Amino acid sequence: MKRFLRGLFKIVFGRTLIIILMVLLQIVALLGSFLGLRSYFPFIWESMNVLGAFLVIFIVNRDEPAEFKLTWIILICLFPVLGALTYVFIIGNFGGIGLKAKLGRRVKETEGLLVTEEDTKEAVRECSVSLKGFSHYMENTAGFPTYHKSEAVYYPLGEDKFADLLRELKKAEKFIFLEYFIVERGIMWNAVLDILKEKVKEGVEVRMMYDGMCSLLLLPYKYPEELRRYGIKAKMFAPIVPFLSTTQNNRDHRKVVVIDGKVAFTGGVNLADEYINKVERFGHWKDIAVKITGDAVRSFTVMYLQMWNVSEKGSEDYEKYLKNIVFEEPLYHDGFVIPYGETPTRSTEVGKTVYASMIDGATKYVHIMTPYFIVDREFLDCMRYAARRGVEVSMILPHIPDKKVVYYIARSFYPELLEAGIKVYEYTPGFIHAKAFVSDDISATVGTINLDYRSFYHHFECGVYFYDHSVVAKVEKDFQETLLKCQEVTLDYYRKLPLYQKMVGRTSRLLAPLL
């Protein structure tokens, strides 16, 4: 309640209200312009109707999920002029052209820095056909190499990650990179910040980047300036500005920490107290994370520097952060590790492909933990086909939601999932924010990618794929232990849900691709 009132106070009396009002004024002005076209320039209005017809043909022939096409076609048919112009504005993504060019430049600068070593390639060739094909795709199409000598620690709760993160931060000698979607002042962030201040005094380079959405409710807009006064290099990614722009839809949803190029953290845990259950928002907060030690940290270092330099001028000395890395103890071969990133500036959906490939390759089981479930027909059919060919497909979702409409949409999929033989469970103690897949005791992935359109198509995301690695068994163990705290969803359970929830869920699925 205190958090809500604090957020409401910031909206009413802060910069957030100005942003909202200015955006609303722009929307009203656009709507007024549309109506003016009809009244004073009927010829242009009719021309726009013709444009809508051509756009429908264009949409039908686009290489994208059918759900995107259907949503836009319905909007254009219902509101020919407004729908057509909105489509051109959003799909044209004129504001994102600059973002795509800047990130593309940084990716080009780092070409040759991320490659699979020859001994690792040889080890991959000796493995299964599925790993060879997957490794080839990840390096040659997505740009993420496979690593052979990297250890991992799995954290079944945010509290576990938090404790170890503090220990690792205190060990830093050269640099600390942090990238988060949510940062909120409290027990967790204050403890991290205290260490960062001390490390700066010791001569450690510290960079902090967080998503600009934080400036609306959680942090002052000029908070990076405060951090810079401590000696921390700080910035917001894509600050929220009071102008209509498609780039504001592309948020940095990653959670990454890189320390000295030796250690990296990722997973669902943000820097806010609910993630470590120091405050309760939606019951018990179940989240997960992983720590990587070894060669695979190299990919996280490069991904971080690429994102950092999107808004920078000049060039980065990438090699500075990749060379002279010495580990105190020899690393041992513990299977294969592939860190990867997702970006809305390219056409390949890496995160979605990783998940789908694990489902397609499964012969025994696929176990999933995810906070949201809003997928296209293609991905749903992938899951249903796996279940129908005898693979045990089980999924854990929250019982207490953080976003009710999104929760109702997820529940609207229950009949289709259950009728295909997919087992669905709800985490009764509260909200599950974990994003994990584990399959056949051989592969697993942990990261920031939800099963929804935002993660698959709109956000910057990241994750780590493990194959024949000891961490796979730990992810599966956690899934089974979490299952003991869940209730199984049945068709009878779904039938007893309130009618309004079903109606909201089914109706909202029409606009789900745009959420």
Image: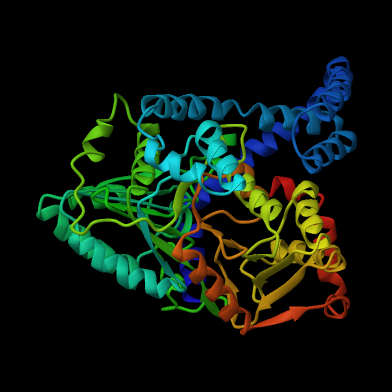
Q: Residue at x 46, y 68 (%)?
A: 6
Q: Is residue 1 left or right of residue 505?
A: left
Compare residues 447 and 324 and report the one nearer the observer. 324
Q: Residue at x 79, y 29 (%)?
A: 84
Tell me how the rendering is colored.
Answer: rainbow
| Image coordinates for residue 406, horizontal then vertical, percent | 70, 61
Q: Quadrant of residue 301?
A: top left
Q: Is residue 54 left or right of residue 483?
A: right
Q: Residue at x 67, y 50 (%)?
A: 356
Q: Quadrant of residue 289?
A: bottom left
Q: Residue furthest left?
A: 202
Q: Residue furthest top?
A: 43
The reply to whether residue 373 is in sight is yes
Q: Is residue 297 left or right of residue 204?
A: right
Compare residues 220 and 421 and report the one nearer the observer. 421
Q: Is residue 484 left or right of residue 295?
A: right
Compare residues 403 and 354 and report the one nearer the observer. 354
| Image coordinates for residue 320, horizontal then vertical, percent | 21, 36
| Image coordinates for residue 189, horizontal then vertical, percent | 33, 65
> Taking 59 as reference, is 172 above or below it?
below
Numbered marks: total: 0
> Taking 425 as reference, is 265 above or below it?
above
> Taking 96 as reference, is 357 above or below it?
below
| Image coordinates for residue 502, horizontal then vertical, percent | 84, 68
Q: Residue at x 81, y 40 (%)?
A: 66
